Image (cartoon, grey):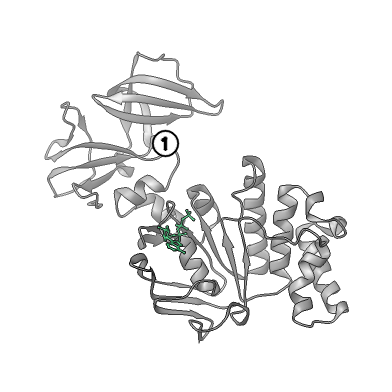
């Protein structure tokens, strides 16, 4: 196991700057998720750590070594790709043991390591099958097995669950998390799915356009996003953003609706952020007009109008109003967020 240090890492593709000098440290044994919208540079950074992409500027260290000029195979990392990249003509056991065979490890030792990984992943009965005889989830497990047998210092995952259906994705998510709890290998995981980031990470790094917007524990990001980008990216359904003015009486929307605000001294134009789960049904609350109701059984999502702006609420209790009708809600002011006109957090 090892720590990983990323120091002002930059990447140019010709004139295009894909990564603008990002820095952060990953501690030994930590599970870090890099998340962000398509094109933010997360895969590029992962590939730079793996040695599959040259580092234009800055330094990347694994353990106590700067790895900038080391080829991938000398970095002591193992990567799991989105498409698994299994050899179709090899059995599961051969796929898992292949990298060890290349290294000249003895047959007995390969068998021992493959059997151990198979046992960890529940693949014992599938070792003689070929990839085409496996389900998507089983293939995913073989790809992880191939990484485990190498006993690397760092696991790198590049969107490993993207090809799985929703149910399997949830299952594999907890399997990867459990695997990490068991092996405690430093892990860097790239995804565009904020739910994966929230549920798996010790630390999340949120990226946009080649820079880090914020990093911290999942709940730090959920509770205190530094700007509207992170606030809107983390949490599902997304935080409501209501435009208006911070005044001494409260937050005033252009329609003259007054929302209660956290204690701030700043005044002027801004954005009021409230998560759908932080609205409560309240007969004395603020009037909203229901547009769409989406009951899931356990809860109801209400998409509504607050004056001329859109607002979404999620309620555990049954909602009896119908589209076009009014209901009253109150935002929980203790978890309301205020952002300035540039989208920066001010409370
Ligand atoms: P996605 O989730 O879509 O994979 P990403 O955040 O992982 O997105 P990267 O693949 O890291 O994004 O790409 C970052 C930026 O660099 C993108 O704008 C992409 O078009 C650009 N880019 C990536 N690879 C190359 C390349 N080989 N040549 C030129 N530009 C590239």
In terms of depth relative to the viewer, which is nearer, 247 or 263?
247
Q: Residue 121 appears at what percent x and percent y?
A: 76, 59
Question: Which of the 4 image quarters holds residue 36?
Answer: bottom left
The residue at 24%/44% (across/down) is 262
- Above or below residue 305? Residue 321 is above
Q: Residue 183 appears at what percent x and percent y?
A: 67, 68
Answer with left or right where residue 95 lies relative to residue 319: right
- Above or below residue 169? Residue 49 is below
Q: Count of labels shown?
A: 1
The residue at 59%/49% (across/down) is 162
Answer with left or right where residue 276 lies relative to residue 73: left
Residue occupying the far front of the picture = 14
Q: Residue 148 appears at what percent x and percent y?
A: 71, 68
Question: Which of the 4 image quarters holds residue 51?
Answer: bottom right
Question: Which of the 4 image quarters holds residue 29?
Answer: bottom right
Tell me the SS state at disc 1.
helix
In terms of depth relative to the viewer, which is nearer, 103 or 187?
103
Answer with left or right where residue 158 lies relative to residue 120: left
The residue at 80%/63% (across/down) is 118
Q: Which residue is mark 1?
A: 277
Q: Residue 75 appears at what percent x and percent y?
A: 58, 80
- Label 1 environment density (alpha carbons within 10 Å; few <14, some 14–19, many ≥20): some
The CB of the residue at mark 1 lies under 8 Å from ligand 1: no
In terms of depth relative to the viewer, which is nearer, 105 or 293?
105
The residue at 58%/62% (across/down) is 157
Task: Report the image quarter containing ligand 1.
Answer: bottom left
Residue occupying the far bottom of the picture = 65
- Image quarter where the N terminus lies is bottom right
């Amino acid at each position: 196991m090892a720590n990983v240090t990323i120091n002002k890492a930059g990447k140019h593709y010709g004139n295009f700057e894909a990564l603008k000098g990002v820095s952060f440290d990953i501690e030994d044994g930590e599970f870090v998720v890099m998340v962000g919208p398509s094109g933010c540079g997360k895969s590029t950074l992962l590939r730079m750590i793996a040695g599959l992409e040259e580092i234009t500027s800055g330094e990347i260290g694994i353990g106590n070594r700067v790895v900038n000029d080391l080829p991938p195979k000398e970095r002591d990392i193992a990567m799991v790709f989105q498409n698994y990249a299994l050899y179709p003509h090899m059995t599961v056991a051969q796929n898992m043991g292949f990298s060890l065979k290349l290294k000249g490890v003895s047959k007995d030792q390969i068998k021992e390591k493959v059997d151990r990984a198979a046992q960890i992943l529940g693949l014992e009965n599938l070792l003689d099958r070929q990839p085409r005889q496996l389900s998507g989830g089983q293939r995913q497990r073989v790809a992880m097995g191939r990484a485990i047998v190498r006993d690397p210092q760092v696991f790198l995952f590049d969107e490993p669950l993207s090809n799985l259906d929703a149910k399997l994705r949830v299952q594999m998510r907890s399997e990867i998390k459990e695997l990490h709890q068991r092996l405690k290998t430093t892990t860097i995981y790239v995804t565009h799915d904020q739910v994966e980031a929230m549920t798996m990470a010790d630390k999340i790094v949120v990226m946009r356009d080649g820079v880090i917007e914020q990093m911290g524990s999942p709940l730090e990001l959920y509770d205190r996003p530094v700007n509207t980008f992170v606030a809107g990216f983390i949490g599902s359904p997304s935080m409501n953003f209501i435009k208006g003015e911070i005044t001494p009486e409260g937050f005033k929307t252009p329609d003259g609706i007054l929302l209660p605000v956290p204690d701030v001294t700043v005044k002027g134009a801004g954005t009021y952020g409230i998560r759908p789960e932080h609205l409560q049904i309240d007969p004395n609350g603020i009037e909203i007009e229901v547009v769409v109701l989406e009951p899931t059984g356990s809860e109801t999502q209400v998409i509504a109008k607050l004056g001329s702006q859109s607002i979404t609420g999620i309620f555990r209790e049954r909602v009896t109003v119908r589209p076009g009708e009014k209901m009253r809600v109150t935002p929980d002011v203790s978890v309301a967020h205020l952002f300035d006109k540039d989208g920066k957090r001010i409370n």
